[in-house]
Image (cartoon, helix red, strand yellow):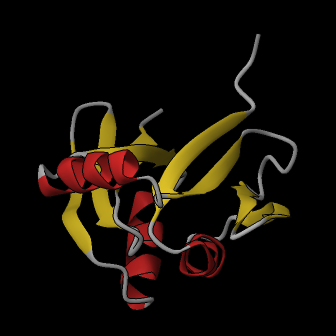
Amino acid sequence: MKIILSSIFVDDQDKALKFYTEVLGFLPKQDIPLGKYRWLSVVSPDAPDGVELVLEPNDNPAAQTFQKAIYDQGIPMTGFSVADMKSDYERMLSLGVRFKTAPDYQQDLIIAMFDDTCGNYIHLYQFKK
């Protein structure tokens, strides 16, 4: 058994696709029309055949309530690993990304949290070697 998909609720699929590709640098993987919405996913350029992140529309009232409650509590919806926190943090700041927390240097981990503009906080992690 292995993980092949993970989903994140987004308030606008087009806006999410733009942010996740143009700002975060993910690659589009699936874009399949499904009526009003799309099966829309992105992947890491380092693992184009790896885990897909599905940009799931939050049209369901339960999804909206959950997403807002988690966001209002300042809880990240998911996390992404980076190889160089300092350069990714500075690059993202230069692109206008709003960080809730700046990089925090722990013993074996550097962690920061940003707003994805689609209703979620996301953690960035760099594990020290």
Identify the residue at horizontal 36%, vertical 53% (top origin).
61
Residue 53 shown left or right of residue 12 in the figure: right
Which residue is situated farthest in the left direction here? 73
The image position of residue 47, as x and y in percent, is 80, 46
Q: Is residue 69 in view from this perspective?
A: yes
Which residue is situated farthest in the top direction here? 1
Q: Is residue 104 in view from this perspective?
A: no
The image position of residue 92, as x and y in percent, is 43, 78
Numbered disc total: 0
Residue 22 shown left or right of residue 31 in the figure: left
Q: Nearer the viewer, residue 82 or 118?
A: 118
Q: Which of 24 and 65 is in front in this view?
A: 65
The image position of residue 12, as x and y in percent, is 51, 74
Identify the residue at horizontal 66%, vertical 74% (top origin).
21
Residue 22 shown left or right of residue 113 in the figure: right
Give residue 85's quadrant in the image.
bottom left
Q: Nearer the viewer, residue 128 or 124?
A: 124
Identify the residue at horizontal 23%, vertical 32% (top origin).
107
Give residue 44's quadrant in the image.
bottom right
Question: 65 above or below 20?
Answer: above
Q: Report the quarter where the N terminus lies.
A: top right
Identify the residue at horizontal 24%, vertical 56% (top origin).
68
The image position of residue 20, as x and y in percent, is 59, 70
Question: 2 above or below 49?
Answer: above
